[in-house]
Amino acid sequence: MHSFTEENYLKTIYYLANRRQGEVSTNALAEMTATKAASVTDMLRKLADKQLIHYKKYQGVRLTDEGERLALQIIRRHRLWEVFLVQKLGFGWDEVHEIAEELEHIRSEELVTRLDTYLGYPQFDPHGDPIPTPAGKMPETGYRKLSEVEAGEGVCLMAVLEHSTEFLKHLDHSQLTLGCVVTVNEINAFDKSVLVQIASGRSVFISHEVARNLLVN
Amino acid sequence: MHSFTEENYLKTIYYLANRRQGEVSTNALAEMTATKAASVTDMLRKLADKQLIHYKKYQGVRLTDEGERLALQIIRRHRLWEVFLVQKLGFGWDEVHEIAEELEHIRSEELVTRLDTYLGYPQFDPHGDPIPTPAGKMPETGYRKLSEVEAGEGVCLMAVLEHSTEFLKHLDHSQLTLGCVVTVNEINAFDKSVLVQIASGRSVFISHEVARNLLVN
DNA sequence: ATAAAAATTTAGACTACCCTAAATTTTTAG
DNA sequence: CTAAAAATTTAGGGTAGTCTAAATTTTTAT
């Protein structure tokens, strides 16, 4: 079995590898795990010994197939629990991340299977992120960032890249919810902010910073 | 905050203090926590420093008010999660203990509150154990052991003292479920086994060992 | 009452994970 | 191309929780 801490490192390596494509650096991991680079190096040696990562000193790190399988299993659990917390317990989508961080480490295959069934085999978590399959594959989505949409296009809000409470509360406040159909009316040439119209007919101003964190279809 | 391990010790001290009335011994704790007496001594010093237990060397241990409050909070979480696992996810009552051992340590008051609401404020867990109140009181039940019931009496099965898979599967097999009304027909003078009649009319033989672990009303 | 047995505590050590400071390697800038 | 900067690793050490073996205290049995 792998420790709570090992699981968190694997998950973090997966995220960083997919964010900035390619190898993951020690410093990036230290920042994400809120530890120091020296501690990361210790753990990388340990994960490499267990064949969960490919690791050459000073060269960055990459998950092995087994490491990726484990990472996706943990992400699957995290996202299923987020669905539970929002859909069944009525938490807001901005309140569930921390709790799911703990729930994802509960060790029981049977529990995850039954939870999945209970929730009706959801495909996406409350932030629109796809839920990895039981077999350990991450579904492809093909979403674009709202910041890359041309003026005049109509698109559907599918997911958020940023999960902070402040960002999510801001979206709630602007009546921007997932599934929401928006039409891009204007793109400001200077600051790249966009003016969109939502289904209710209301116009909503979205800064470039926000638009970069919204995924659409 | 208190560690996972500290929480387990507090819970275990509570159980043992209520099982064999009075002070809890180092060895009993070592057996229950599957560690060695020396490790228990270390932890007792730590819990005493934190004012969670009353502890005098060589004299056994007792929870302080604060320690008992924490222990009951953990037991409350454990039992609520067991209700969830059985009622919502469809686990058998013999399968939920280990998983609830992990879930009980998830740190979120809000989670427990919402779970309680979601489950409809249950009073008892799937084994018939009362669920401590949010304020940290253990409800009194006044149950007797089936082994103490007189011949001729009709009683209702309310709870089990033993939680092992084998014991619970045996009860399932004998069609002895909680809430089941049973009439004690005969008490064997030699081995104290009892012959009871259940609602379906069927007679069920119950050994003294089993009867001692069944609580009735 | 006291010696043997049982229970408990202390001493010293181990692992997992984390840290700071110093050393080393890689990257970058001039 | 090389010196400075940045990134990374190594060295040495800390805490939490565990262990074994030895020392100490309490209990039990004669």
Image (cartoon, coloured by chain):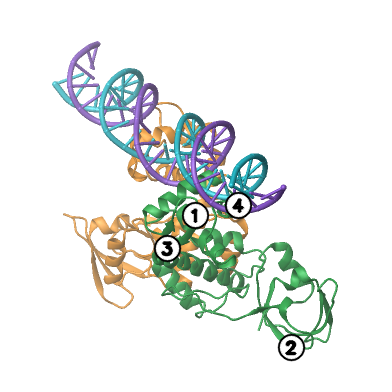
Chain colours: A orange, B green, C cyan, D purple
Residues at marks 1 and 4 on the same chain: yes
Of callouts 2 and 4, which one flags the residue occurring earlier in the amino acid sequence? 4
Mark 2 belongs to chain: B
Amino acid type shown at disc 4:
Glu
Amino acid type shown at disc 3:
Gly
Residues at marks 1 and 2 on the same chain: yes
CB contact under 8 Å: marks 2 and 3: no
- In the displayed structure, does residue B109 sit left or right of residue B192? left
Residues at marks 4 and 3 on the same chain: yes
Of callouts 1 and 3, which one flags the residue occurring earlier in the amino acid sequence? 1
- Dot 2 falls on a residue whose secondary structure is strand
From this view, report whether residue C15 is shown above or below residue A138: above
The residue nearer to you, when weighing A54 against A89, is A89
Residue located beneath label 1 in the image = B59
- Quarter of the picture containing the C terminus of chain A is bottom left
Residue located beneath label 4 in the image = B31
